[in-house]
Image (cartoon, grey):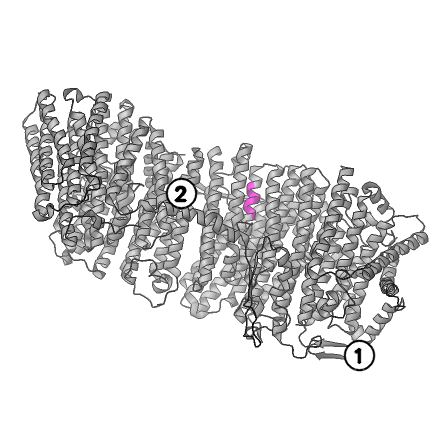
Amino acid sequence: MVVEMVFLAPFLTGLIAFFLPRTLGRPLLPLTGVFHLMLSVMLWVKRPSPLFPGYFEVTPEGLLSLIVISLLFFLVSIYAMGYLRESTIRSENIFNGSMLLFLSTMTMVTLSDHIMVMWIAIEATTLSSAPLIFTYRSKASLEATWKYVLVCSVGIAMALLGSVLITIAMDIGKVNVPVSFSALTLNARQLDPLWLKAAFVFILVGYGTKMGLCPMHTWLPDAHSEAPSPASALLSGVLLNCAYLGIFKTNKIMVAAGLGDFSGTILMVFGLMSIIAAATFILKQTEYKRMLAYSSIENMGIIAFGTGIGGPGVYGALLCLIHHSLIKSSLFLTSGNILLGYGTRLIESTGSLARRMPKTFVAFFGGFAAISGFPPFGIFIGELFIILGAFKSGHYSAAGIFIFSMCVVFAGFAKQVMIISFDDKSSRDKILEKQDMIWPQYTLLLTSVFLCFWMPDTLYRTIVEAVTSIGGGF
Amino acid sequence: MNLFYMSFLILFSGGILALVGQRNFALMKMLSVVSLATGCLSGLIASAQALWQEKVFQFSFTYLNHFELSYKIDSLSAFFLVVIFLISMIAVIYSYHYMDHSENALATSVHYFFFSLLIISMALVVTADNIITFMLSWEIMSLSSFFLVIFDYGKAENRKAGYLYFIFSHIGAMFIFAAFGVVYGYTSQFGFNGMAGLPDTVKMIVFVLAFIGFGSKAGVFPFHVWLPHAHPAAPSHISAVMSGVMIKTGIYGILRVYSLLDYHVSVLGMIVLVAGVISGILGVVYALGQHDLKRLLAYSSVENVGIILIGIGIGMIGVATGNPLMAILGFSGGLLHVLNHSIFKSLLFMGAGMVLHKTGTRAIDRLGGLLKRMRITGATFLIGSLAISGLPPFNGFVGEFFIYLGAFNGTLFGNTAFVAGVLAVVSLAVIGGLALACFTKVMGVVFQGEPRSRAAADKDETGNTMLFAMMILASFCIIIGVLPGIFIQMTLKGLSSVSMGYGRIPLEPFIQMTENITLAAVVFLMVLLVLLAMRTLAYRGKPVGRKGTWGCGFTQPTPKMQYTGSSYSASIVEFFRPVAPFQEHHPPVEGRFPEKTIYHSRIDDIAERHMTTIIVRPVMWMFDRLRWIQHGDIHLYIGYIFLAIVVLLFFV
Amino acid sequence: MMIESILFYVGAIIVAPFFSAVILKVKAFFGGKKGPPLLINYYTLIKLLKKGSVYSTSTTTIFKLGPIVSLCAVLTVLMFLPIAGVKPVFSFKGDIIFVLYLLGLGRFFTIAAAMDTASPFEGMGAAREANFPIICEASFMMILVLFYKMTGNFNLSSWFSDTQPMTLWQSAGSPLIFVVISLFIILLTENARVPVDDPATHLELTMIHEVMVLDHSGPDFAMIEFGAFMKLFFYATLIARLICPFNTGHLAVDVSVFAGAILMVYVAAGITESVMARYRMDRVSKFVMTSFALAFFATILTLEFIG
Amino acid sequence: MIYSVDTILSLVLLSILFSLGSSRLTVLFKVIAFQGVVVSIVPLIIGGREFGWGDITFTLATMTVRGIVIPFCIYFAIKKATIETKFRPIVGYNASMMGGLIFIVMAAVVGGKLHLPAVSEGKLLFPAAVTLLVAGMFLLMARRNAIAMVLGYIMMENGIYLVGTTFSVQARHIVEFGILLDILAGVMIMAVILQNIKQAFDDMDTARLRTLKE
């Protein structure tokens, strides 16, 4: 068992998938998914040491992301089987291959420890997901891909510069260790603070672009809404986590270097801005997939905010991170059902979902309640801790803005969801719902419910490990 | 103890059964009604025991490996548990015949599921003993009740109601989050215990935040806007539970926070009192102006929450000014009114449900004369109306009587207590008068006179469980009204866990007061009996005829000529015009042979009206100003990245 | 003592119709007429009791219940009333609130009975009956606050029995005049007298109380009338004790002084009716507000004194 | 040695100004290729490091990719006719050039104040790197032609590369190579997108790519 195997395996199958016809390529997705899930679980249980230490490392936050990615990909791949059957995609081999490469690169992000390797992996996620967004080959999807690739590449280039600045900080501080997050965290005090701060700024803006923090979020609604739903689910569900991982690890160095206040404040500001931006566009949204995309921006804002305030907030942020992945991907998959059923992305052309697609409705509304922070879904606990943490750290006005903008987001979101679910439009006919395009969502939601009440001890300890590593906790 | 677990288990299984058994409608309904009712009954017994013995139960579970879900049933919780389980049980019984649309089996079973969740979560809210537990139960309560509100989502107004309710409950919850956040910020523990040790200004902030949060659930003006929309939208027994019980969890929250903070200054009491006065008076004025039976009842809930808050406010000021008698009278009056209101309000909603069920309309001015065929409904509704108007010898009077005594007691003392007392007394009097007007209107227009439309004509009452439920509640109204002793003891026991610094409350003086009420009520009933006997004597052998109503010389009366609800309330509403803008719409009657004309009137809720202009529009405007950032131009998108870096580099 | 109280109670019930006739007599005097005999009300009651009744087809049991409950309410109320300074039959802390709400109960049933007939005129009367007393109650409560503040007791007997009214005057002084006026306004309003209502008008549209009982007949109507006499007596007693607060301790003297005082009240009501016209309906609210303002004013003024 | 580095770098600065001031895309292509070659060589010739075969191979590879493969990859993706279409830029050419000049001066001043570990060996290194970066960014923001934007991105990457390889001593070839591969792949994907844009819209104006908005 080698750590690197986890991302090499999907990489290989991905390469193969490019050359396979659709009949063979399609089952490859869930197969790889299962295999990957098995590997991830083994990784979790055994925690082996990597073949290239210094480049790769198994960290608690990485494990958390990895297991989420794995689970999600597996469920999404099952959904994708149904989705590909229902919708017409011209070159499916590219879709399949890109999905697998995407999985591989995301896995690599979670396992990488070297700053540059991390950057390479994150940039690779951009590249491997670009074809996914362009799947439908429409003008709109072309535009979305163009913006996605260009904005993200520019943003991530900033992160590269930031990474370089870290090495400069090392040089000035005369630190001679591998350029890996773990080594740097240990020696953070010796790094030059000025250059470290500059590096953090660049890395935050860079990976923040990828994560969807306002004002660098601009590509996100376009990309997430134009991609086919299984891809959107992955983009929103886990890709954002990967970018967050980069910020998280850098923040770890900052905290270790005693610059936690600086980085925390910046994270909080960006978090709040993201929530406000999301609120702005959710309020009068006309397309439901864009609405979900903005909701992702909101949640990334929440997570950034939580990470920024520290203390219980970090714990809350990590909970939000996990649950947001589960729930948002479920929502995007559900939006795929709606898209297939109604054939439109416009909110006002939908309606009566509760009557016409009851099963989809349950998944959709459950997802909505979950993402809005209602129990028994996990985001509730996450948001609770973030709010408590914000008050604990004395950021009263920030907490006020946070709560206010969350309320606005909720008002907007609820309005659209009410329209989609209940509005009485002309037709009341049932729309056929396929079983295999329902239960992946249910599984995701139920996982979130489950994790809201009981967590395996190892999961809890891993989260706490990650939380304490950036100075969070109770 | 085990009984509590058992009742939760039965309740939950009832909900699950409903979901599972939706294919067989009759069986599903039977099973879930029986199990929900049994669950409520066992919970009722358990909580009544807990209240009576004044024992404190505590239990907790590990939650998410590190935290605790802890529950504590002290006497205050037990008091509210009694109310919750009692009313829920009766509402469940009522629902058996009310939910009789078998073609709607799926919706019905889902409704039972969420109903069971609602009961459970309400019970958990009043027993929760730390922040996480409380918020968890609170949010589940909001969510499950939301689903009950949009039960009939086919109607646009119900969807609007559900939306409003959703938003308000979320925002309210956020205020409570904030209150607890402040607490946590100072105590760094999730338990409630440290709250008494907060600095004074912080206590003030916490209380105000919590008051807004809980007030929005309780329906305190001006946070009540959702209430008149949501309560009518739900099925009637759910309206009964929501109006009767669920909004009381807000009251519970206020009391609990007050008790935990252990902060006795008259300012807090004044806040509560003034909020109560405003909700009370405006609630009933708006109720008076409604044309929709269930909306009217919903506004009347706002009024009664106002009365409860007046009681609590008097109690708080009593404590703050060192005036134990005033305090206990106020608190116990308020608590008793919690019980009373839950009884008569659910009774009235059930009556309204029967009317709606049979006639298919909630419009007051389309009804009339129902009493002739719906005898039990009418009689119980009459009792409910008398009780809600606070008239003796019914239960509504008892609670108000205690609040009056407390308020009058307050007038004996220094400035704050005096002002509070006078304010409470006068406003209670006004509220009483208005409530009387309001419910004579309902009785008179809906149940008496002649049917105003075909919908109301010749409608019988059917559904034994519905009638049974109403009769039970009506008898409670009389029992509490005549024999309030035991119930006052309940409230006093409930109060014993509210920290006022008095130690044990002596029961005797208060029992004495209830005995007076009993005496007076018995005297009244005796006189009534004598008079009835005399009346029978007076009519013995006398000719008794029946004829049409004398039309003062007009020979062709029609039911349309009757005084309508709108005309009945017009002059009173007119008096309150500044706070209840009254709008009329009727095309002028023109020409020698005028066309048919219409008349339409409504009164606006100023909170609702100004909510749009003061909050919603500015917020929308503000956010609209931000919309340009997503303009689609990639050059500027890249510019944002650049800008972000440049700005941040200034702070390095 | 108890026997004495009950005797006075019964006595009050018996003489109440007589006093009401005084008003008619006064009005007749002002109109330059001879007027009905002073025992006219007894004749009317007996006449009504002898008759049968006709019920509207629209009515239900509530219609029959109305007169009984309202009469019963007033009968019960009188038990708490100290008549001529004698202790009442019952008395407890806060009895006055019970009394006021009992009167409210009576009003509820009067209104309900009126609404039962489906007559537009009775509905109109009912609406007015529901409207005007709202402020009356508030101002009554204001007066109670004053009394309570002065005496520290909270029942009718502690304010109106024995020499207590004297104590009220001593501690309150001249502001109590405001209270008397305020109470008089309440009396006029609650009992449907001019200028709030004109029981003798010939147009149903302008009536309040009388129009509500249009459809009652026979013994039912007798009960209503009887109840109205006693309600008037109740309020008149309160005012009489205030304007004539003396108590000698000799029962006969006290009773005659009380009788004189209460006669003054009735005459005053009669004079008011004779010299004033009925207000327009929308002015009535303002008139009633005056009583509240007076009571409020009195309370504030007095509090300045007792401080 | 120092002398030659600064000479080359001044050429680079000149080329930046040139690229900002030119309306012709072919000029831009040449400039990019030139810069690619320069930034690949500079690390080799500064610092007086001992360099072995590995370094030389790597430098050659970088040079090939940055100087030849990347520009040509885009060049061949688009037909020549399209390349020469001109659009009015968002910021004018002369203004751009003036801005570039001012920026170079500013960068030189700031660079002088910062005490970077490796900067003592080439006075123009910092200004050149930063200017490359900012000029690339500027092209991204100020040119409406999609191709010019991609070229701007490449210029920016060149700047970052220059910073990375010259100011830090921590370079590892395998990592550098990974980065290079990423950029190459990125540019190739952009080339594909450019191709698609041309097919779909028949020109390269980014104004056509503004439909997705709120």
Element marked by disc 1: loop
**Label 1 neighbour load within 10 Å: few <14, some 14-19, many 20+:** few
Q: Is residue B259 left or right of residue A306?
A: right
Pointer 1 chain: B
- Is residue A362 shown left or right of residue D21? right
**SS for dot 2:** helix
Residue at 52 percent of width and 46 percent of height = B214
Q: CA distance from mark 2 to mark 1?
A: 78 Å
Instruction: Tell me what residue is drawn at x 71 percent, y 47 percent.
Output: B405
Find residue B274 and report its image quarter: top right
Where is residue B17? Give x, y as percent: 43, 61
Which stretch appears magenta?
Answer: B251-257
Is residue B256 rendered magenta in the image?
A: yes
Please provide percent x and percent y for residue B57. Answer: 54, 44
Residue A165, percent from left and from top: 23, 28
User: Label for residue B541?
Assistant: 1
Residue A101's spot in the image, x, y percent?
17, 46
Q: Quadrant of residue A22?
A: bottom left
Please give left or right for residue D105 compared with residue C2 in the image: left
Chain bearing mark 2: A
Q: Front-most of B10 and A177?
A: A177
* Camera-side residue of B94 and C288: C288
Q: Residue at x 57, y 66 (%)?
A: B364
Give amino acid for label 1: Gly
Q: Is residue B462 visible?
A: yes
For label 2, the residue is A383
Asked if C96 appears above or below B96 in the picture, the reply is above
Q: Quadrant of residue C104?
A: bottom right
B89 in the magenta segment? no
* Mark 2: amino acid: Glu
